[in-house]
Image: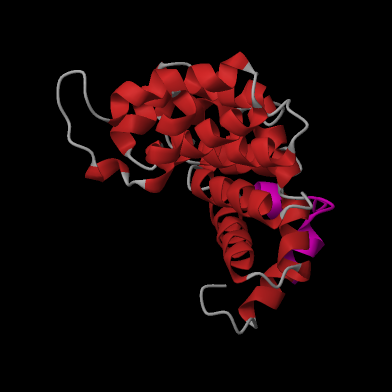
């Protein structure tokens, strides 16, 4: 069944599958999306989300998931109150953000996409924070999206990550994201010359100063 297929996909690298007509991981995408869309069994939903997260690490399969409506389905799946289901949806979405059709959704600071990922940077779940901040760090390489993240109140939760977290993976992602925001959206981060700096500017500078003294080399 779909639950068994999900367990197999989670345990294997997408590159390890044999590709062929009516065979291979691309043929698992639609059934996995349907499991989430069915909103029946939370355990199966969580497994399907984890499976799509694994498949989404492959560029070709990432586009397949998006073209099959996977992004919207994962977003709808986050309405589930089960934190494990929410995290699996978020982690799968984080692996899809580099798809062209998805990146465009982050250009508007008021979009649900920006709100979701910025919001989960303040989650009580460190793994959800890792997924959200990692996705934002990836997206912040694009100047227009970097500006949207800043305008979407994305700086303060990243500053909190840097100042409060002791988890290396999370601290690393917070550092990368802040560095890219400072590089690709400097006016939005710190204000234009002669203008009053935005409220988050001082906190951002403080966080960057802390990072410069960090014992964690990537930070």
Quadrant containing the C terminus in the rendered view: bottom right
Left or right of 106? Residue 99 is left
Quadrant containing the N terminus in the rendered view: top left
Q: Furthest residue to the left?
A: 20
Residue under the point 48% across and 16% down: 69
Residue under the point 40% across and 31% down: 5
Residue nearest the observer in this picture, 86 or 137: 86
Q: Is residue 68 above or below residue 178?
A: above
Q: How many marks?
A: 0
Residue nearest the observer in this picture, 66 or 194: 66
In magenta segment, residue 199: yes
Q: Which residues are magenta?
A: 187-206
Left or right of 219? Residue 11 is left
Left or right of 111? Residue 25 is left
Residue under the point 64% across and 54% down: 127
Q: Is residue 212 above or below residue 176?
A: below
Residue under the point 58% across and 79% down: 216
Q: Quadrant of residue 17?
A: top left
Q: Quadrant of residue 4?
A: top left
Q: Is residue 194 visible?
A: no
In magenta segment, residue 161: no
- The image position of residue 19, as x and y in percent, is 17, 31
Residue nearest the observer in this picture, 12 or 145: 12
Q: Is residue 60 above or below residue 57?
A: above
């Amino acid at each position: 069944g779909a639950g068994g297929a999900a367990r197999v996909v989670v345990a294997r690298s997408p590159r390890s599958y044999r590709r062929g007509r009516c065979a291979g991981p691309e043929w698992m995408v639609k059934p996995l999306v349907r499991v989430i869309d069915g909103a029946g069994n939370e355990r199966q939903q969580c497994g399907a989300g984890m499976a799509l997260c694994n498949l989404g690490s492959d560029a070709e399969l990432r586009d397949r998931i998006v073209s099959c409506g996977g992004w919207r389905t994962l977003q709808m799946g986050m309405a589930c109150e089960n934190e494990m289901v929410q995290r699996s949806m978020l982690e799968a979405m984080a692996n899809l953000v580099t798809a062209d059709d998805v990146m465009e959704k982050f250009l508007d600071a008021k979009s649900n996409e920006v709100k979701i990922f910025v919001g989960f940077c303040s989650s009580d779940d460190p793994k959800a924070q890792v997924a959200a901040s990692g996705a934002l760090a990836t997206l912040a390489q694009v100047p227009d999206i970097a500006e949207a993240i800043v305008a979407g109140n994305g700086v303060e939760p990243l500053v909190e990550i840097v100042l409060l977290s002791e988890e290396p993976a999370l601290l690393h992602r917070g550092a990368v994201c802040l560095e890219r925001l400072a590089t690709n959206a400097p006016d939005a981060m710190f204000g234009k010359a002669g203008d009053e700096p935005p409220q988050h500017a001082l906190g951002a500078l403080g966080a960057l100063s802390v990072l410069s003294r960090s014992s964690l080399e990537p930070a």
